[in-house]
Image (spheres, grey):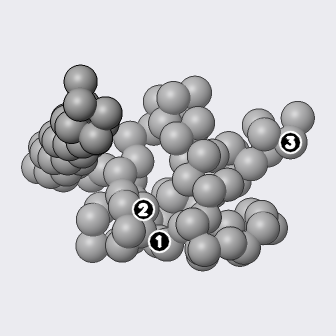
Amino acid sequence: MIEESILEKIQEIMKDHIGANNRISAGEIAKMLGLRQEATHVEPRKYLRQAIKELKIPYAGGSKGFYLIADKTELDACIRALDKRIKGIEERKKIVLDAFKAYYNL
């Protein structure tokens, strides 16, 4: 299956990118996998999330690239970053709800 093959390739690629100081960009991953190149790199990001879920391999990353989490310190940093993103999304959600209510006088 194509997706299994891509996940196996991601697993091989990421073995060379252990630790936050050894990141690889989503664009580089896409190129190595032969995926479409687009600005947001939706495909490689999708496959990285799938690899975390299905292969149980702890990858982390963001705008600066992706890496295999090497230790508890990196795991904690990853979790803090995710929690920060959740908080930001919750704040934006509240702002939109408040704006809707104000705009429509609800």
Q: Residue at x 52, y 41 (%)?
A: 49
In the image, residue 72 lies at what x, y percent? 14, 43
Q: CA distance from mark 1 to mark 2?
A: 5 Å
Q: Secondary structure at mark 2?
A: strand
Query: Which three-letter amino acid code belongs to the residue tagged 1?
Result: Ile
Dividing the picture into quadrants, the one containing residue 30 is bottom right
Which mark identifies residue 15?
none
Seen from the viewer's position, the closer of residues 90 and 102 is 102
Hey, which residue is sitting farthest right in the picture?
1
Which mark identifies residue 66?
2
Q: Does 18 sit left or right of 76 as displayed?
A: right
In the image, residue 92 lies at what x, y percent? 24, 45
Q: Earlier in the sequence, mark 2 or mark 3?
A: 3
Hey, which residue is sitting farthest front in the picture?
105
Q: Badges 1 and 2: C-beta atoms under 8 Å apart? A: yes
Query: Which three-letter amino acid code belongs to the residue tagged 2?
Result: Phe
Q: Which class describes the residues within 10 Å of circle 2: few (<14), some (14-19), or many (20+)?
A: many
Query: Which three-letter amino acid code belongs to the residue tagged 3?
Result: Ile
Q: Residue at x 78, y 39 (%)?
A: 3
In the image, residue 54 lies at what x, y percent? 58, 27
Q: Residue at x 36, y 58 (%)?
A: 61
